[in-house]
Image (tube, rainbow, N blue to C red):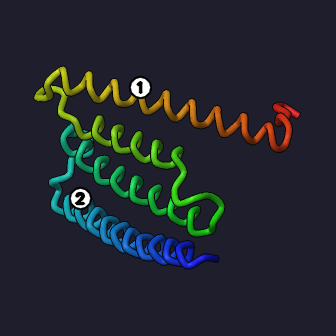
Amino acid sequence: MTLYERFEQLVILTLTAIIAAIVVSSIWMLLREVVASLVLGALDPLDHATFQTVFGMIFTVVIALEFKRSLLVAAERKFSVLQVRSIILIALLAVVRKFIILDLATTDPATIAALGGATLALGAVYWLVRDQDRRERDAEHGPSVVGA
């Protein structure tokens, strides 16, 4: 490995450790919040605002885990630093999280339209990147047989 590749590995491993600490801390705080709310009876799972808050916290942890997984794949040197597909997936998760925590009663329609447009654009880019990856893989190994 070159000096720069070693530096890149060190940065990736450092970021992975930081994100792991954030995930552990987030899970602890989420667990503490849910258990405390359940014990105190303040958590009503059928309440829309509570549902949004809890699932927003859960999606935050999922986004951090996906980012950490992307870094680990890069650390194994399977790909360059980060794949575009992983970045797009993380962005899609962030937009979905925003939709979940969004209060439709107080949100401007232009904001909802902008988030919808961003979701469509990210979905289209993800599809194009995935399709390009599939074509490159088929060119290397031949087309995969479906249903065999």
Residue 20 numbered mark, or none: none
Q: Residue at left 21%, top 63%?
A: 39
Q: Residue at left 82%, top 36%?
A: 144
The crowding category of the residue bearing disc 1, from other C-alpha atoms within 10 Å (few below 14, some 14 to 19, many at least 20), is few
Determine whether label 2 and label 1 are within 8 Å by CB.
no
Q: Position of residue 114 (x, y in %)?
A: 26, 26
Q: What SS does tag 1 mark?
A: helix
In this rendering, the count of numbered labels is: 2
- In the image, residue 62 above or below residue 91: below
Q: Residue at left 34%, top 65%?
A: 27
Q: Position of residue 46 (x, y in %)?
A: 25, 39
Foreground mark, 2 or 1?
A: 1
Q: Residue at left 29%, top 35%?
A: 99
Which residue has dot 2 on it?
Answer: 38
The answer to which image quadrant residue 22 occupies is bottom left
Quarter holding the N terminus? bottom right
Q: Amino acid at mark 1?
A: Leu
Which residue has dot 1 on it?
Answer: 120
Q: Amino acid at mark 2?
A: Leu
Q: On the rendered structure, is 12 left or right of 51?
A: right
Q: On the rendered structure, is 106 left or right of 65?
A: left
Quarter holding the C terminus? top right
Nearer the observer, 125 or 145: 125
Which comes before the other along the chain, label 2 or label 1?
2
Q: On the rendered structure, is 4 left or right of 148?
A: left
Q: Position of residue 125 (x, y in %)?
A: 49, 32
The answer to which image quadrant residue 52 occupies is top left
Distance, label 2 to label 1, CA atoms, is 37 Å
Q: What SS does tag 2 mark?
A: helix
